[in-house]
C-alpha cells in the first residue's frame, strides 16, 4: 500500500474514540470479546479500563 501525505494526515487526526467502535465491530465478527480487545490495547498503549470510559 502506498501512503500519501493526505492519508498520513487523516490517520494522524483520528482519535481513539472514533476508532474504538470500529475495533469492537471487527473483533466481534472474528469471534473475539471486548475484554480481549481491552487486554491487547492495554498491552500496546497502557490504557486501562478507566481511560476507555473517558475516551
Image (cartoon, rainbow, N blue to C red):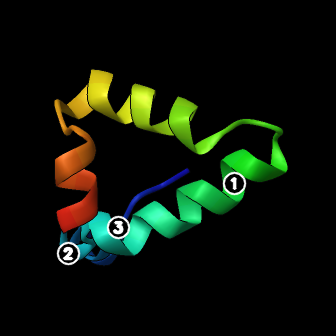
Q: Is residue 11 visible?
A: no
Q: Quadrant of residue 42?
A: top left
Query: Mark 2 — residue?
Result: 13
Residue plotted at (73% across, 36% down): 32
* Secondary-structure class at tag 3: loop
Q: Between disc 3 and disc 1, whose residue precedes?
A: 3
**Picture coordinates of residue 34, whole percent (x, y):** 57, 44
* Left or right: where 24 falls relative to 39: right
Q: Where is residue 43 in the image (x, y as percent from the top left)?
A: 30, 21
Q: What element carries label 1?
A: helix
Circle nearer the N terminus (1, 2) = 2
Q: In which quarter of the image is residue 30?
A: top right
Instruction: Say few, some or many: other residues with alpha carbon within 10 Å of mark 1 (under 14 / 14 to 19 / 20 or more).
Output: few
Which of the numbered marks, if any, corresponds to residue 26?
Answer: 1
Q: Name the residue under label 3.
A: 4
In the rendered image, the quadrant that contains the C terminus is bottom left
Residue drawn 29% across and 78% down? 6
- Residue 42: give its label: none
Secondary structure, mark 2, is helix
Dot 2 or dot 3: first in sequence order is 3
Amino acid at each position: 500500500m502506498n501512503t500519501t501525505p493526505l492519508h498520513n494526515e487523516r490517520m494522524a487526526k483520528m482519535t481513539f474514540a472514533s476508532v474504538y467502535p470500529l475495533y469492537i465491530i471487527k473483533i466481534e465478527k472474528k469471534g473475539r470479546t471486548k475484554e480481549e480487545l481491552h487486554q491487547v490495547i492495554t498491552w500496546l498503549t497502557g490504557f486501562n479500563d478507566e481511560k476507555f470510559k473517558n475516551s
